[in-house]
Amino acid sequence: MKKLLIFTFLAALPFAGCTKKQESATDTIPNIIFETDIGNDVDDALALDMIYKYLDAGKINLLAVSSNKESRYSTEYIDLMNRWYGYPDIPIAKVIKGIDSENDARKYAEFVCLQKDSTGQPLFPRPAFDYDAVPEAVSLYRKLLAEQPDHSVTIVSVGFSTNIFRLLQSGADEYSPLSGRELIAKKVKLLSMMAGSFGENRLAEYNVVKDIPAAQIIADSWPGPIVFTPFEAGIAVKYPAASIENDFKWAARHPVVEAYKHYLDMPYDRPTWDLIALLYVVENSPEYFTESAAGKISVDDKGYTSFSAEPDGPHRYLTLDSTQAERTRQHFVELITAQPKNRN
């Protein structure tokens, strides 16, 4: 998630990476695992909408959506979205004994999942959801990674570091004889992470603060490049309330619109932290953002992140000037307001 309004200590987590050499080698459609704390902030829902539009356009392969928010409704909302957009078979994973964030914001995921129409039927009809049948995240990660070609998977992490930290610490199992660290090094090309703060007035960013030990280990020990979308980047680009109110007339009911309207009192424009982390992976272009120099990011015990330039460092972070921010905002509106192509 990100920067919940009720948190004033949001701020920085050090994760950025991916060298120009590695980026230029991205000649194939990215295989993505989307790691999200969906339900804590509505930009996760907007980013998930973007994922379906990229699927419609054939620009990505989506291996799974993994929730790091311990909530039945976090995963149920993902299932609802998968079905509404016409992708019911996308695997979903859940966190077990994760970080407590259940009451960090208005529960839009629960609200949408429980919405009824005038006859008392679900507003978004779908098969009954079996939360107990949803696999634990690390197990699904290891299964999926073991099945993929080497250096072919991109993880887009826009919530807490809990699941990817546990993956890093995992041991051999029925899916692979490799340790988690070895499996990541062999299979994962890039970690695109919404976390941290590197501005002049940097803060202790929400995603980092909620699980500082996990964020510290990821920053220190992840065996590959990380590119960070920091707090400042998302603040620079806000999704407009006017679009939510006016651009979805083609749908009688829309699960992202319903979520957005419930999350905060309308009208409000919402920062696009998670959308930028995804955009970087799929449409990496200097018209949208600028990468920092290579370096190394660290996380202190209060959740503040620091960046030190190093020529061969594994981390980078993104910045946007005013021109890039406006182009990015316009692009997000264009993507998100488009009608899904795979709906029945």
Image (tube, rainbow, N blue to C red):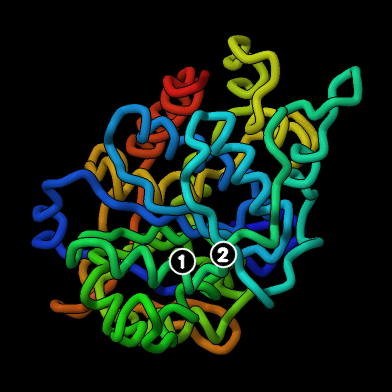
Residue drawn at x 32%, y 67% is: 145
Looking at the picture, how far across and down is residue 178, in whole percent? Answer: 29, 85
Q: Is residue 252 above or below residue 127?
A: above
Looking at the picture, how far across and down is residue 189, in whole percent? Answer: 23, 65
Please name the amino acid that badge 1 sits on.
Leu
Please name the amino acid that badge 2 sits on.
Pro
Residue drawn at x 30%, y 50% is: 281
Horizontally, residue 24 falls left or right of residue 184, namely: left
Q: Nearer the viewer, residue 57 or 125?
A: 125
Looking at the picture, how far across and down is residue 14, in whole percent? Answer: 41, 74
Disc 2 marks which residue? 135
Looking at the picture, how far across and down is residue 175, in whole percent? Answer: 35, 75
Helix, strand or loop at mark 1:
helix
Residue 259 at least partly seen: yes
Helix, strand or loop at mark 2:
loop
The CA distance from mark 2 to mark 1 is: 6 Å
Residue drawn at x 55%, y 73% is: 208
